[in-house]
Image (cartoon, helix red, strand yellow):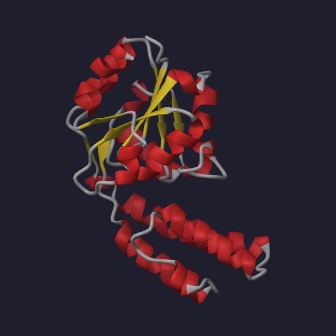
Amino acid sequence: MRVKAVIFDLDDTLIRSGIDYRVAKVSAIKFLVESGVDETLLNENMSNMEIINRAIEDLRKKNFSEIRIKEIINNVYAMFNKAELKSLDKAELMDTSLKTLTELKSLGLKIGIVTNSCSTYSKKIVEKFSLDKYIDILVSRDDVTRHKPDPEHLLKALEALGVDSSEAVFVGDHFVDALCAKRAGVKFILVKNKKWSSQEAEKNAFTIIDDLGVLSSLIRQL
C-alpha cells in the first residue's frame, strides 16, 4: 500500500454541514459593491473564495491600497465566519465518518483535514465530534494565505504530516477540492453530494464514491 496519508475536506464530506452561505454571500456581495467592486463580476453561484479573489483582483486594478483591500476582505471573512459559527448546532456527522476514520487509523495512516472554513468553526466541529482522536493535522482558512483551490492549502497539510504528494489522497465533495488536489499533484477521491454535482470535480477525480464507508477498502487497493 503506497498511500501514507488521507486528507479530508470537512463540510459535506466528513460532516453534514448546516452552513447557509446564501445569505452571507448576498451580504458580502452588497458590501463589496458598495466598497468599489464592479457588481457585474460577482454572483451568488460563485464559491466564497471565487467571490473574494475576484474582488481583490478588481480592487487592485482600481489601485486600492493593500491596506484598504485587506480591511474590505476581512469584513467579508467576518460575514462568512458568522454564517459558519451560527451553523454549529445544525452540523451532523456523516453516517460512516467515524467507522471510516477508525478503519484508516487501524491501517496506520496519517489523517488530516483541509477546509476553507474558519479555524474557530473548524476546531469547534472537531471538538464536538471528538475527531481529534483520529486526525493528525487540521488546516483551516486562517492557517494559509491562499485557500483551496490553491494547492498551498493541501501542501501545508502534507508538509506537516511529512508525506509526499504521491503518497496521499484527498477526499472531498466539491470541484474546489478537485482542483486543489490536481494542482498539488494528489489523487482526488470524489464523494458524491446531493447538494450539487460537478463535471469539473468528476473529470479530475481518480475515482468517485457514493459513501465514505467504502474508502478504507479502496485505500487498501492503492
Q: Residue at point 60% right, 43% down?
A: 151
Residue sitting nearer the eye, 121 or 202: 202
> Residue 75's quadrant in the figure?
bottom right
At a point 52% along the width and 40% down the height, the residue shown is: 182
- The percent coordinates of residue 205 (x first, y second) are 39, 39
Q: Which quadrant of the rendered structure holds the C terminus? A: top left
The percent position of residue 177, horizontal first and vertical second, equals 45, 46
Q: Residue 20 falls in which quadrant of the image?
A: bottom left
Q: Quadrant of residue 188?
A: top left
Front-lying residue, 96 or 89: 96
Q: Position of residue 181 (x, y in %)?
A: 51, 39
Residue 198 shows in the view:
yes
One can see residue 139 in this view: no
Vertically, is 143 above or below 212? below
Outermost residue toward the front in this view: 203
Q: Is residue 137 above or below residue 82?
A: above
The image quadrant where one finds the N terminus is top left
The residue under the point 49% across, 84% down is: 30
Number of dots carrying numbers: 0
Residue 119 x %, y %: 52, 49
Front residue of 205/194: it is 205
